[in-house]
Image (spheres, rainbow, N blue to C red):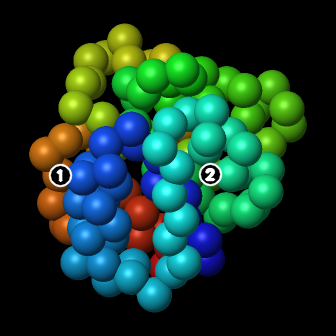
Amino acid sequence: MKILVADDSRVMRQIVIRTLRQADFGDHEIIEAPDGAAAFETVGAEKPDLVLSDWNMPGMTGIELLRALRAGGNEVPFGFITSESSEEMAKMATDAGALFLIVKPFTADIFREQLGSLLG
């Protein structure tokens, strides 16, 4: 499987990738995007099996990315990894088609719990 990690922080992308490996998902191909617009292009070009996106990114936010994908008919499994979480954000994410919202800081156990059924 191919996983796209979208975050405007290179360090955070590396932390997400490291945590995926710690959660035993390191055998999947992992690709990166530095913002929502690049992630949108990457989804079209690379056809990932899962998108893990930050919420707050310049240019195109994570929720804008998800809405743009869904508006274009793309149903790629999508989840947020973000430092902010409120009931309103969680509802907005779910209503837009996100499968989950993981709050930073996170652990390998949280990744296993949220991604296990998707990534086997």
Location of residue 64 in the rendering, given as x and y in whole percent from the top left corner: 60, 22
Q: Earlier in the sequence, mark 2 or mark 1?
A: 2
Q: Could you say whether the residue bearing mark 1 is in a helix, strand or loop?
A: loop
Mark yes or no: residue 48 visible.
yes
Give the residue at x 56% y 34%: 36
Picture quarter containing residue 27? bottom left
Q: Closer to the camera, 50 or 58? A: 58
Residue 96 appears left or right of 24: right
Cα distance in 3D space between marks 2 and 1? 20 Å
What residue does disc 2 label?
Answer: 77
Q: Is residue 90 above or below residue 23?
A: above
Quadrant for the N terminus in the image:
bottom right
Q: Closer to the camera, 83 or 7? A: 7
Q: Could you say whether the residue bearing mark 2 is in a helix, strand or loop?
A: loop
Residue 1 appears left or right of 100: right
Location of residue 101 in the rendering, given as x and y in whole percent from the top left corner: 37, 38
Q: Which residue is most to the bottom?
A: 27
Amino acid beneath label 1: Phe
Q: Is residue 11 above or below residue 99?
A: below
Give the residue at x 56% y 23%: 60
Give the residue at x 38% y 24%: 56
Q: Residues within 10 Å of mark 1 (few under 14, many from 20)?
A: some
Location of residue 3 in the rendering, given as x and y in whole percent from the top left corner: 54, 65
Q: Is residue 49 above or below residue 57?
A: below
What residue does disc 1 label?
Answer: 106
